[in-house]
Amino acid sequence: MLLLKNACILQFQPAAVKNGMDILIDGPRIVDVGKNIIVDRKDTRTVDLEGKLVSPGLVCGHNHFYSVLARGILAEIKPSTDFVSILQNLWWKLDRAIDEEILLYSGLIGAIEALRSGTTSVIDHHASPSFIKGSLKVLKSAFEKAGLRGILCYEVTDRNGNRGMSDGIDENISFAETIERERKSGLTDNLIEAAVGAHAPFTLGEEALGMLAEAVNKTGRGLHIHLAEDLYDPSYSSHIHRKDLTERLEDCGLLNEKTICAHGVHLTDSDIEKLNRHDSFLVHNARSNMNNGVGYAEKLPSFRNVALGTDGIGSDMFEEMKFAFFKHRDSGGEYWPSDFLDFLHSGNSLLERYFNMSFGKIEKNYKADLVIYDYQSPTPLVGENIAGHIAFGLSSRDVKTVIVNGVTVYENRQFPFDIEPVYEEASRAARRLWQRMDEIK
Ligand SMILES: [Zn+2]
């Protein structure tokens, strides 16, 4: 057991600050929270937090660890003036150049950097067309090595031919079956769950959508897809398929409470009504939308469920929340930091829908995914201003210790394994990745 004494608990929803609290963790769960908890079991490790802040772990609702080694990329990339050419000249060359080793180091660095930022769960959307079969197991091993929680999927698309499409479907199904097998063999507290991934409607024909629907039914998981990121997606849908984006998905039975739609910048009111009716999720990726110049998701307040993601720009959810808030203000929006803290907190609902357990609070029977901070506040910190502290102060630099599934995976800013060799190998893998990209025609 782990007993954290004298914590100052930050609760995001409803926002509250509770001083002088003890937190008792047994295995992957919080089993008690209160004042002066006394435990007489000999296997209990007691840590006095001396009033330090403790919050639930942060959730990144949409990410791409396969792009981790693209940072500072030095490869020949043609000038890209619009969204589709950015995909063609950069991301669709990069994903084709990924092999097993490159993926492993992308995943390890992604996981290490997420935990360092206080992000305890990452919902990943993976693509590696030259290494599809078995790719999600490699990514899973990277998450597990670092101790990061995740929901993984493979991005199905028609852009690599019919074989590439069906291999992507198979990878999603076989990975979900692996998770089921682990569960049936008694591993009920696993770190990893599965979703069914798809690129975006404009690279998915009717056959692919039908097979995705079968995969969703067969696995009991939800679709994780890019939707209306750029105006090209809804225009293509109307022009080629004579249907709105969500109409296509709904007609195939692909909208449900586990559906994760990333971006949604150009969804119409009727699209949003459909997503809300099916209780589906929108994941807002403010920095990525700005980086790609795809426009601003002005209709954020109309969605029933909104979480925040990074779309491959690291996993620092403090930074993402700040950008999301500032961009909203810049566009004339009326939301306050507390609304964006609600969005950040909503990622926990996604975890609950996939893991079928309780996440996002420091209370009895919740999962023990926690972050301990070294934050020295110059002003009073109370429930009413937590979001203001995050928008204008508290950040990932204050993260000191991280606990996931009851395991201390990062303590006093140190990992329990040597990360230097991982960074060295990652750097070598990055050079190889960039070279391989130049060789792709
Ligand atoms: Zn994305």
Image (spheres, helix red, strand yellow):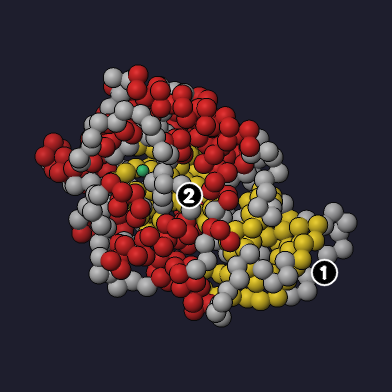
Q: In the image, 4: left or right of 117?
A: right
Q: Which mark is residue 38?
A: 1
Residue 287 is situated, as x and y percent measured from the top left of the image, at 35, 53
Label 2 vs label 1, nearer the camera: 2
Can residue 352 be seen from the camera position used here? no
Q: Is residue 100 above or below residue 51?
A: above
Q: Which amino acid type is marked by label 2? A: Ser
Residue at 52% across, 66% down: 394
**Figure quadrant of the C terminus:** top left
Residue 331 is situated, as x and y percent measured from the top left of the image, at 25, 65
Q: Which mark is residue 137?
A: none
The residue closer to the viewer here, 343 or 427, is: 427
Image-quadrant location for residue 378: bottom right
Residue at 34% across, 42% down: 225
Can residue 291 be seen from the camera position used here? yes
The residue closer to the viewer here, 399 or 122, is: 399
Quadrant of the picture in which ligand 1 is shown: top left
For the residues labelled 2 and 1, say whether their Cβ atoms are less than 8 Å apart: no
If you read the primary sequence from the N terminus, does the residue marked by circle 2 or circle 1 appear first? 1
- Mark 2 element type: loop
Residue at 66% across, 76% down: 19
Q: Which mark is residue 315?
A: 2
Q: Is residue 60 above or below residue 145?
A: below
Q: In the image, 229: left or right of 434?
A: left
Q: In the image, 310: left or right of 13?
A: left
